[in-house]
Amino acid sequence: MAMLKEFKEFAMRGNVIDLAVGVILGAAFGKIVASLVQDVVMPPLGMLLGGVDFSEIFINLSDQTYATLALAQEAGAATINVGLFLNNVLNFIIVAFAIFIVVKQMNRLKKAPPPADPTTKDCPLCLSSVPIKATKCAHCTSNL
């Protein structure tokens, strides 16, 4: 029972719940970005490059010839899926940029920590740094 109680305390900490919410939102955001890349960005980019369908760009490693990636995969042929890889790279870049923007904005909203109390002061005669509680300068022996 002690282990169950310990787990409950761990799970109810704010950081764990925040992390869980972040993972769920991140997964949903990833699906939106994947759709953005596959359905919005890549089709016009393919049209600009002469009607290329990036999801169909592949390197066939077998002896047979296949017209589409789906046919090659259905036949069990070994392929290097260059177009799908490019889609995933673009997905990653968009997600990474979005996370960068969110983190940057969150850091701007955070309050700066208050400056630490000084631990030293300058000697008025020799300008050496001495501890704040010192009554005599260690360098020039003047009274502070």
Image (cartoon, grey):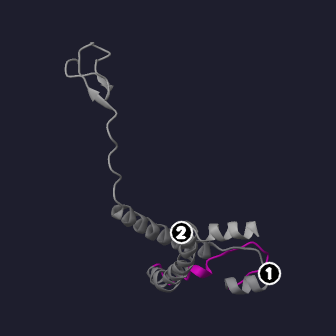
Residue type at mark 1 is Gly
Packing grade of label 1 (10 A; few <14, some 14-19, many >=20) is few
Does the magenta-highlighted stretch encompass residue 56?
A: yes
| Quadrant location, the N terminus | bottom right
Q: Secondary structure at mark 1?
A: loop
Q: Nearer the viewer, residue 87 or 47?
A: 87
- In the picture of the structure, the residue carrying the numbered disc 1 is 76
On screen, residue 68 versus residue 74, left or right, reads left
Q: Nearer the viewer, mark 2 or mark 1?
A: 2
Q: Nearer the viewer, residue 45 or 50?
A: 45
C-alpha gap between disc 2 and disc 1: 48 Å
On screen, residue 86 versus residue 75, left or right, reads left
Q: In this rendering, is residue 2 above or below 47? A: above
- In the picture of the structure, the residue carrying the numbered disc 2 is 14
Report the residue at 63% width, 68% height from top: 9
| Quadrant location, the C terminus | top left
Count up the numbered dots: 2
Whether label 2 touches label 1, CB < 8 Å? no
Q: Residue 53, located in which quarter of the rendered image? A: bottom right
x and y, in percent, of residue 46 in the image: 49, 81
On screen, residue 128 versus residue 39, left or right, reads left
Report the residue at 53% width, 68% height from top: 14
Task: Give the mark nearest the N terminus, 2 or 1.
Answer: 2
Report the residue at 49% width, 71% height from top: 95
Packing grade of label 2 (10 A; few <14, some 14-19, many >=20) is few
Report the residue at 57% width, 68% height from top: 13
x and y, in percent, of residue 142 in the image: 23, 14
Does the magenta-highlighted stretch encompass residue 29?
A: no
Residue type at mark 2 is Gly
Q: Nearer the viewer, residue 58 or 106?
A: 106
Q: Secondary structure at mark 2?
A: helix
Q: Which residues are magenta?
A: 49-67
